[in-house]
């Protein structure tokens, strides 16, 4: 068996696609992989189980074409809901599809998650190949994300007026009737009458039909004139019915008319007059601040070399990030003259030295919707706090510290998803306990709380806390021993408090989450 055929079989087994072997032709319209799995359709609703959710992290920037039963093109509108297209966060394309004359264009692929239509995004390339499109798709930015498809169908105007449209595996197909020749597509060669219409009796822009050996010339919808001489477009904006400084947009056929609107930065009745909006007159900005009008919206900023709140006042200052004292790959933020160095999401390291990309999670750990975190969930084996710490350390990790609001929110969502997969007895146990968050009492009587990384709660840069009503308190049965020790007091995300923070005895057994070192 030839090597190329072996590679085609491997591609099909890995991606559920059919590969096309174009030889030396490098045009993506002849050099692409086919995505046709039925679960990629926006009409496919999966059951929500994690093992039924696909992820396109394995893509590597190849050119792809969608075919039925998946669909024939990427949707340009937000999918109806999550858990479609065989994944958790379905990906759609923002922007219109290009014409053949546009060549390769760049578009944004968005992933719908919760109420966010574009929670994750990545850039893709799109090209029109006449009757179909091809897409250059990189790896999905996270899991579980997968590219969606939807059927285009025989939409109005796709085929020449005398042609017929039929659905097929590769999409709609236009066919000219007997006595005509051409590809049948409105945007292509159309259908040319081999009989009397080939004599050129109709005028420019007119449609010719050969009926019972008679030539019938008509002007297409949206045009006017003598079909035996010339058909011209009906321009609803000539003359313009709009007011002064308004924008007129001609409405395409069928029918005629115009849409009048005031351009950005203007207001008023577009059929009478549009007047400019100067959001900076008078300026709403503070002293020494700069005001810039952005389509009727005032943008206040402090000039270079100044600092402060531009809505209050700007004072001369030093940009602590110029030059940046941070390490390679780190992000520098000027905070009132103080440089704050951090590693971006998906990177780790000492931001004062260098930040490096987080590699694939170690064995036993998994990637989640929390970028840059490799986690391992122990929901089915609750332990006391000390045993939970020991279990994580034995897996080359540590208790996951739920310090910031975004991580707490994501963990709550993950717990809600995974509780449905646990046996009833474990769901009951989780409901009565919770999940350790890596925070313990540093002294008796609730005088202080210490994170497992040795940083006191009161001195951390994160101001976020998520205490339940009446907390922190230990109750009558909470221990009084030293930090994290037997009988001490530890903090968990309490299930009975809606997974908010609550104090518990460290000896009670609760679920826990490990993060890879």
Image (spheres, rainbow, N blue to C red):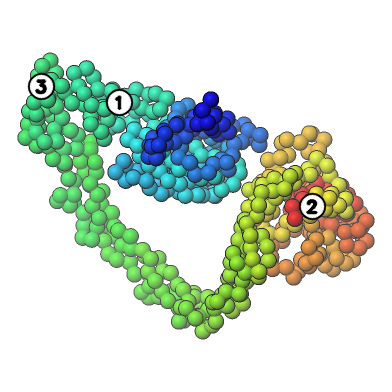
Q: Residue furthest bottom?
A: 316
- First along the sequence among labels 3 and 2: 3
Q: Secondary structure at mark 1?
A: strand
Query: Horizontally, is 480 left or right of 85 in the view?
Result: right
Circles 1, 3 touching at the beta carbon (< 8 Å):
no
Q: Secondary structure at mark 3?
A: helix
Question: Is residue 45 among the parts visible in the rendering?
Answer: no
The front one of 278 and 361 is 361
Q: Is residue 16 above or below residue 487?
A: above
Query: Alpha-carbon distance for marks 1 and 3?
Result: 22 Å
Query: Horizontally, is 331 left or right of 275 in the view?
Result: right
Residue indicated by mark 1? 174
> Going 65% across and 55% down the picture, which residue do you hit?
358
Question: Picture quarter containing residue 143?
Answer: top right
Question: Is residue 333 among the parts visible in the rendering?
Answer: yes
The front one of 13 and 386 is 13
Q: Secondary structure at mark 2?
A: loop
Question: Picture quarter containing residue 45?
Answer: top right
Residue indicated by mark 2? 396
- Mark drawn on residue 196: 3
């Amino acid at each position: 068996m030839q090597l190329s055929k072996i590679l085609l079989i491997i591609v099909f087994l890995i991606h559920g696609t059919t590969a096309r072997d174009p030889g030396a032709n490098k045009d993506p319209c002849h050099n692409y992989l086919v995505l046709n799995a039925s679960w990629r359709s926006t009409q496919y609703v999966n059951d929500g189980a994690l093992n039924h959710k696909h992820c396109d992290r394995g893509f590597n920037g190849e050119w792809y074409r969608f075919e039925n039963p998946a669909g024939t093109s990427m949707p340009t509108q937000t999918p109806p809901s999550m858990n479609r297209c065989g994944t958790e966060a379905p990906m759609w394309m923002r922007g219109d599809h290009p014409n053949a004359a546009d060549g390769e264009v760049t578009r944004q692929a968005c992933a719908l998650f919760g109420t966010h239509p574009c929670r994750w995004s990545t850039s893709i390339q799109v090209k029109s190949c006449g009757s179909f499109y091809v897409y250059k798709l990189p790896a999905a930015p996270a899991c579980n994300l997968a590219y969606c498809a939807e059927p285009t169908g025989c939409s109005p105007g796709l085929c020449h007026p005398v042609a017929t449209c039929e659905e097929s595996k590769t999409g709609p197909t236009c066919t000219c009737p007997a006595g005509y020749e051409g590809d049948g597509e409105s945007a292509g060669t159309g259908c040319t009458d081999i009989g009397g219409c080939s004599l050129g009796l109709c005028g420019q822009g007119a449609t010719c039909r050969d009926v019972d050996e008679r030539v019938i010339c008509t002007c297409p919808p949206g045009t006017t004139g003598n079909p035996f001489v010339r058909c011209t477009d009906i321009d609803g904006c000539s003359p313009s019915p709009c007011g002064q400084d308004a924008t007129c947009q001609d409405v395409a056929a069928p029918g005629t008319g115009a849409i009048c609107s005031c351009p950005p930065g203007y207001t008023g009745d577009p059929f009478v007059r549009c007047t400019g909006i100067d959001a900076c007159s008078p300026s709403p900005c503070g002293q020494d601040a700069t005001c810039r009008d952005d389509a009727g919206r005032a943008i206040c900023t402090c000039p270079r070399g100044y600092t402060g709140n531009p809505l209050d006042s700007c004072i001369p200052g030093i940009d602590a990030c110029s030059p940046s004292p941070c390490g390679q790959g780190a992000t520098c933020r000027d905070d009132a003259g103080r440089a704050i160095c951090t590693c971006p999401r998906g990177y780790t390291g000492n931001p004062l030295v260098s930040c490096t990309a987080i590699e694939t999670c170690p064995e036993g750990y998994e990637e989640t919707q929390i970028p840059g975190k490799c986690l391992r969930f122990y929901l089915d084996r609750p332990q006391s706090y000390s045993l939970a710490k020991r279990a994580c350390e034995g897996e080359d990790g540590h208790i996951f510290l739920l310090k910031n609001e975004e991580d707490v929110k994501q963990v709550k969502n993950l717990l809600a998803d995974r509780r449905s997969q646990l046996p009833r007895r474990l769901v009951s146990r989780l409901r009565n306990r919770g999940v350790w968050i890596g925070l313990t009492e540093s002294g008796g009587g609730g005088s202080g709380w210490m994170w497992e990384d040795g940083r006191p709660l009161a001195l951390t840069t994160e101001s976020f806390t998520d205490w339940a009503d009446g907390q922190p308190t230990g109750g009558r049965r909470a221990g009084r021993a030293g930090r994290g020790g037997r009988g001490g007091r530890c903090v968990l995300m309490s299930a009975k408090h809606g997974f908010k923070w609550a104090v518990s005895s460290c000896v009670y057994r609760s679920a826990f989450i490990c993060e890879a070192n």
